[in-house]
Image (cartoon, grey):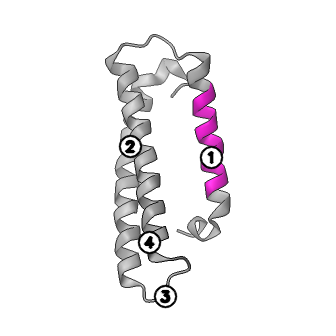
């Protein structure tokens, strides 16, 4: 959204859709943990990771909504830098969770 600001409204819709997908996946993960007898990590750790990732996506959607609410005309350099950090963290989290790639 911050890279192609001209399409901010369209990107906000995509972010909202991804947030809903994230909610669904978090619920599915928790349900799967409850149905699985042996898990690759502690149940509490899996649940905490799922909830934490869901929180991050919620915060991203909230930030996008705030940009719209406050009629921000263009993102600052600092906002773009923070967004890039989130992208890097997401990439590293994905790479650290190879079993998630199969889902």
Circle 2 SS class: helix
Indicate which label's residue lies in the foreground, 4 or 3: 4
Outermost residue toward the top in this view: 73
Indicate which label's residue lies in the foreground, 4 or 2: 4
Query: Reading the chain from its start, which is encountered first: label 4 or label 2?
Result: 4
Disc 3 residue crowd, few under 14, some 14–19, many 20+, Cα 10 Å: few
Which label is found at residue 58? 2
Q: Are marks 1 and 4 in contact (CB under 8 Å)?
A: no
**Label 1 to label 3, Cα distance in Å?**
28 Å
Which label is found at residue 89? 1
Q: Are marks 4 and 2 in contact (CB under 8 Å)?
A: no
Query: Reading the chain from its start, which is encountered first: label 3 or label 2?
Result: 3
Q: Residue at x 56, y 80 (%)?
A: 40
Outermost residue toward the bottom in this view: 37
Query: Reading the chain from its start, which is encountered first: label 1 or label 3?
Result: 3
Query: Reading the chain from its start, which is encountered first: label 1 or label 4?
Result: 4
What residue does disc 4 label?
44
Disc 2 residue crowd, few under 14, some 14–19, many 20+, Cα 10 Å: some
Viewer-proximal residue among 35 and 13: 35
Relative side of 16 to 60, left or right:
left
What residue does disc 3 label?
38
Expressed as whole percent of the image width and height from the top left, the position of residue 102 reads 58, 70
Tell me where residue 25 sits by quadrant: bottom left
Q: What stretch of residues is rendered in magenta?
A: 81-93
Circle 4 SS class: helix
Q: Are marks 1 and 2 in contact (CB under 8 Å)?
A: no
Expressed as whole percent of the image width and height from the top left, the position of residue 41 reads 54, 76
Secondary structure mostly seen in the magenta stretch = helix
Q: Are marks 3 and 2 in contact (CB under 8 Å)?
A: no
**Label 3 to label 2, Cα distance in Å?**
30 Å
17 up-or-down from 52: above or below: above
Disc 4 residue crowd, few under 14, some 14–19, many 20+, Cα 10 Å: few
């Amino acid at each position: 959204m911050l890279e192609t600001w001209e399409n901010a409204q369209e990107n906000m819709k995509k972010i909202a859709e991804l947030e809903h997908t994230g909610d669904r996946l978090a619920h599915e993960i928790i349900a799967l943990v409850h149905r699985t007898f042996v898990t690759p990590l502690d149940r509490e750790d899996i649940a905490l990771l799922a909830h934490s990732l869901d929180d991050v996506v919620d915060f991203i959607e909230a930030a996008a909504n705030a940009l719209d609410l406050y009629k921000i005309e263009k993102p600052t350099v600092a906002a773009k830098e923070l967004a890039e950090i989130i992208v890097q963290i997401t990439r590293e989290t994905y790479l650290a969770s190879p079993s998630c790639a199969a889902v």
